[in-house]
């Protein structure tokens, strides 16, 4: 079970020198708009990923007139230091340098529910792949090496196509064929595990008689067997000229997506409210599946009352509490949330200052 025992946010946006010893279950942060609630969620996400879900530019998260961001924490007994500037990136576990962001992600599996992150149902294929591969990695960490090898092969193919150089193309096409089968198989296995997860109680988030379903689209054409290396390679060789004309490979796992359905109706035809609820349901199904596999993630929920009505909030929090995962929730505080103070710590955020109440 992943637990942030202590955290010291020395520099991150408007959060400066903030120290917390979070509760092992629920941590509720209340504050008005623009006070720093989302910044806190972003800082926690940054700690587990070494990147933001809001911006790619380090300047956006480093406080004004400061040169670097720094977050110290104790997670599962491991002292973690993350210090980052425009030119330097330092990650330490118990004062030992860590070279890979994946070590952070593995130590702190973090599931985030935030309007700023985007809603997976009705969202972009890139966002859908991000959530999909987050889950795949946590149940199959060795897949990371395959992803890296695939991205290298894809980069080389696109470079060769851009420069009209086909001498080594077949070699890299064969690599893509092999690696894409591994990725598609891992993703398909993950989707099947999700579907087998016992999420019937979660259907309280939608109407009980509604059917929620999701299907993986591999990124290949329908007549290509994405589980067969030879089938993929034949397709790639057959369409070499087409790829040469457009200067890139436009099929493969890097174009995969997930299609969501409610009562057999595609996500694109659903209302924004229905897309939000289904996104919430899919996120929590991912959490539930990891819990069933004894991988308990940290759950971040930003601005909860803006996304769900009071009844849905009560149900969602009650369900998460039963899972015994560590939860960080932000809310504007207009309405009381069903939080047992014996099992929670409540904070107020005002102008970047976090105070326990």
Image (tube, grey):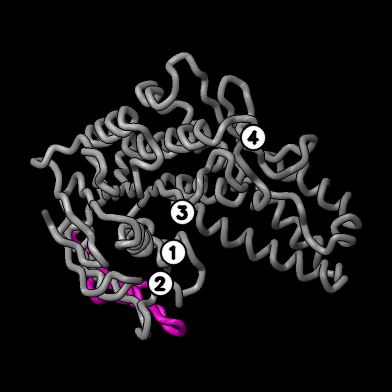
State the separation of the CA atoms marked 3 and 1: 11 Å
- As rendered, which of 329 and 32 lies closer to the eye? 32
Instruction: Please tell me which residue is depicted at 34% across the width and 73% down the height of the picture.
Output: 91
**SS under mark 3:** loop
Within the image, what quadrant is residue 264 found in?
top right
Disc 1 marks which residue?
Answer: 52
Q: Is residue 92 magenta?
A: yes
Q: From the image, tell me which residue sits under label 2.
A: 61
**Most prominent secondary structure in the magenta stretch?**
strand
Left or right, 187 with respect to 206, comes to right
Against 184, residue 106 (above or below) is below
Q: Residue at x 86, y 67 (%)?
A: 166
Is the residue 339 above or below the residue 302 in the image?
above
Q: Which range of residues does the magenta coloring cover?
A: 77-98
230 drawn magenta:
no
- N-terminal-most mark, 2 or 3: 2
Q: Which residue is mark 4?
A: 268
């Amino acid at each position: 079970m992943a637990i942030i025992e202590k955290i010291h946010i020395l520099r991150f946006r408007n959060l400066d020198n903030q120290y917390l010893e979070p509760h092992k279950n629920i941590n509720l942060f209340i504050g008005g708009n623009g006070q720093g609630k989302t910044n806190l969620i972003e800082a926690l996400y940054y700690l587990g990923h070494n990147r933001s879900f809001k911006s790619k530019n380090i300047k956006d998260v480093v406080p004004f007139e400061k040169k670097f961001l720094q977050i110290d924490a104790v997670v599962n007994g491991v002292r973690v230091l993350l210090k980052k500037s425009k030119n330097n990136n330092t990650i330490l576990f118990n004062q030992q340098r860590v070279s890979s962001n994946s070590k952070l992600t593995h130590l702190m599996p973090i599931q985030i529910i935030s309007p700023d992150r985007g809603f997976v149902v009705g969202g972009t294929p890139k966002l859908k792949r991000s959530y999909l591969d987050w889950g795949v990695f946590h149940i199959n960490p060795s897949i990371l090496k395959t992803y890296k090898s695939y991205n290298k092969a894809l980069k080389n193919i696109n470079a060769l196509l851009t420069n009209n150089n086909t001498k080594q193309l077949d070699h890299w096409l064969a690599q893509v064929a092999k690696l894409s089968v591994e990725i598609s198989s891992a993703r398909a296995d993950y989707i099947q595990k999700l579907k087998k997860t016992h999420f019937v109680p979660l259907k309280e988030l939608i109407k009980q008689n509604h059917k929620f379903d999701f299907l993986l689209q591999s990124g290949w054409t329908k007549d290509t067997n994405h589980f067969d290396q030879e089938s993929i390679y034949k397709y790639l060789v057959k369409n070499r000229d087409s790829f040469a004309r457009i200067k890139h490979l436009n099929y493969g796992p890097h174009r995969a997506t997930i299609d969501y359905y409610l009562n057999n109706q595609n996500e694109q035809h659903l209302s924004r409210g229905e897309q939000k609820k289904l996104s919430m349901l899919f996120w929590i199904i991912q959490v539930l599946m990891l819990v069933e596999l004894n991988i308990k993630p940290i759950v971040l929920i930003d601005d909860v009352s803006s996304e769900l009505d009071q009844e849905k909030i009560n149900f969602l929090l009650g369900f998460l509490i039963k899972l015994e995962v560590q939860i960080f929730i932000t809310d504007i505080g207009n309405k009381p949330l069903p939080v047992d103070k014996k099992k929670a710590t409540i904070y107020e955020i005002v102008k970047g200052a976090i105070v326990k109440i």
